[in-house]
Image (tube, helix red, strand yellow):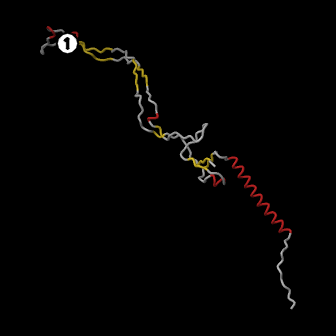
């Protein structure tokens, strides 16, 4: 019989709009790749080996930036100097860290104010021999009010000890915590 055999075609046809759409997708993909490469190059320029990355977020920089090996800096303040990775300091000040010292205070007082005291004048009591006064002898004693001496200006020197207490004290300046890493590869 005259049935025609169907053979698959090696080529198929697309419209021009299909070709344009495919071309646009390829350009977008190429642009994204180029942009990502450019972004990584810029970030690697900003964060070379030895640089520090700080953030309020705990996500590690290799995740955020997409490159590098980073070591987290924990429980340290950054101290700007001319050599790197030197550590030191303490959260507390101990008495042993303080030098021996003394405290001196000079205190000067003013003159005591003039004032009166009552006192007895025993000079008139001379009755009898050798001041032998019997119980039944009557005599008079003078009583006076008079001024005392008003002088009294003087200085006191108060000194302290020259040793420390030996006790530690917390010493932390006001701070805000951040996450920090330095790039080592």
Outermost residue toward the top in this view: 129
Judging depth in this view, the residue of 95 and 51 nearest the camera is 51
Q: Position of residue 90 (x, y in %)?
A: 50, 40
161 relative position to 184: left or right: left
Outermost residue toward the right in this view: 2
Q: Quadrant of residue 77?
A: top right
| Neighbours of disc 1 within 10 Å: few (<14), some (14-19), many (20+) | few
Q: In this rendering, is residue 13 above or below 131?
A: below
Residue, x 22% and y 12% (percent of image)?
A: 122
Number of on-image labels: 1
Residue, x 86% and y 86% (percent of image)?
A: 4
Q: Quadrant of residue 144?
A: top left
Q: Quadrant of residue 174?
A: top right
Mark 1 element type: loop
Which part of the image, by quadrant, shows the N terminus? bottom right
Q: Position of residue 5 (x, y in %)?
A: 84, 85
Q: In this rendering, is residue 139 above or below 98?
A: above
140 relative position to 73: left or right: left
Outermost residue toward the bottom in this view: 1
Mark 1 lies on residue: 140
Judging depth in this view, the residue of 145 and 85 nearest the camera is 85
Q: Position of residue 83 (x, y in %)?
A: 60, 38
Judging depth in this view, the residue of 46 and 134 nearest the camera is 46
């Amino acid at each position: 019989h005259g049935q025609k055999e169907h053979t698959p075609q090696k080529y198929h046809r697309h419209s021009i709009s299909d070709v344009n759409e495919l071309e646009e997708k390829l350009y977008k993909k190429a642009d994204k790749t180029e942009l990502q490469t450019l972004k990584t190059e810029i970030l690697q320029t900003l964060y070379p080996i030895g640089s520090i990355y700080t953030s309020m977020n705990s996500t590690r920089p290799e995740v955020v930036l997409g490159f590098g090996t980073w070591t987290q800096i924990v429980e340290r303040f950054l101290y700007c100097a001319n050599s790197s990775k030197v550590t030191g300091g303490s959260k507390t000040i101990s008495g042993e860290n303080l030098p021996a010292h003394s405290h001196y205070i000079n205190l000067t007082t003013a003159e005591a104010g003039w004032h009166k005291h009552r006192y007895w004048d025993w000079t008139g009591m001379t009755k009898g021999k050798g001041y032998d006064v019997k119980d039944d002898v009557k005599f008079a004693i003078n009583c006076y009010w008079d001024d005392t001496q008003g002088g009294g200006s003087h200085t006191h020197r108060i000194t302290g000890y020259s040793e420390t207490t030996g006790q530690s004290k917390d010493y932390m300046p006001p701070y805000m915590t951040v996450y920090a890493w330095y790039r080592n590869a």
